[in-house]
Amino acid sequence: MTSNAETPSAQPAAQLWNLPNVLTMLRVVLVPVFVVLLWQDSTAARLGALGVFIAAAITDKLDGSIARSRGIVTNFGKIADPFADKLLTGSAFVMLSLLGVIPWWVTIVILVREIGITILRFVMVRRSVMAASNGGKLKTVLQVVAICLLLLSATELFGPPLGDVVLVTGLVVVYAAAAVTVVTGLDYCWRAWRIVHDHQP
């Protein structure tokens, strides 16, 4: 009787510390390491920060795939995964602005959209699940590519003209990411409004 009574209470702890959630928390732990490395503002440190960022981005891909394939998606993972994503990319954009690589307006636009839409999705979850759109996936790809290109310290590594080409490419991609970020944010707001409107009596 005792063992049967303890089983339900033991399950949440076991589910909480599954592999996808551990990978998600690892991504959170890597964020301060990434920030400290990038703050050094040297070519070697920025390459180290790039390596940490890529490793963290890989965990983002793995945790969701593993959770879905094994059927171990948890409520904790649904909340922690997007939080870890926004923390990682948000930290990267803030640091790149602090270092003067990208203008602050780009970072502010992206952060406002990411935080706002994350809150909106949590608010809307009781009414309907707002699945990620193709535009949202494109936004994520553009953000990651832009961050990687801008972390590369291409000018110092390769010199002109190749380094300048990589830097300019990174800036073009980050502006494209900002534009797609705004458009997809407006799309999420429109979809949320339609859901609320359709559920009104």
Image (cartoon, rainbow, N blue to C red):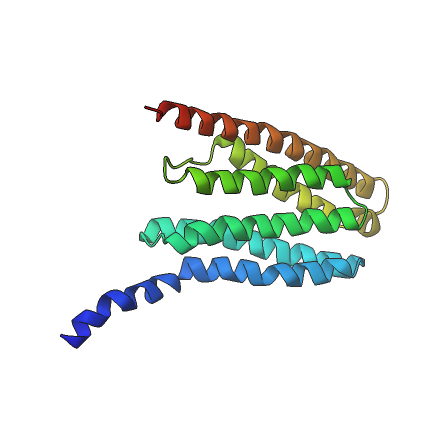
Query: Disc count in the image?
Result: 0
The answer to whether residue 62 of the structure is visible from this angle is no
Residue sitting at 51 percent across and 55 percent down? 59
Left or right: residue 115 versus residue 38 is left
Give percent across and percent down for residue 184. 55, 30
Horizontal and vertical percent for residue 91?
Answer: 66, 52
Residue in the picture at 53% in, 34% down: 136
Considering the image in quadrants, where does the N terminus appear?
bottom left
Q: Nearer the viewer, residue 65 or 114?
A: 114
Q: In this view, does 199 lie above or below 102?
A: above
Can see residue 46?
yes
Residue most toward the front?
201
**Nearer to the camera, 56 or 111:** 111
Front residue of this view, candidates 162 and 184 = 184
Quarter in which the C terminus is drawn = top left
In the current view of this chain or complex, which residue is farthest to the left?
1
- The residue at the point 40 percent across, 27 percent down is 195
Seen in the picture, residue 94 relative to 199 is either above or below; the reply is below
Left or right of 196? Residue 33 is right
State the residue lying farthest toward the right. Answer: 160
Q: Position of residue 145 (x, y in %)?
A: 64, 42
Residue 63: quarter of image = bottom left
Tell me where residue 154 appears, x and y as whole percent.
78, 47
In this rendering, would 161 be left or right of 141?
right
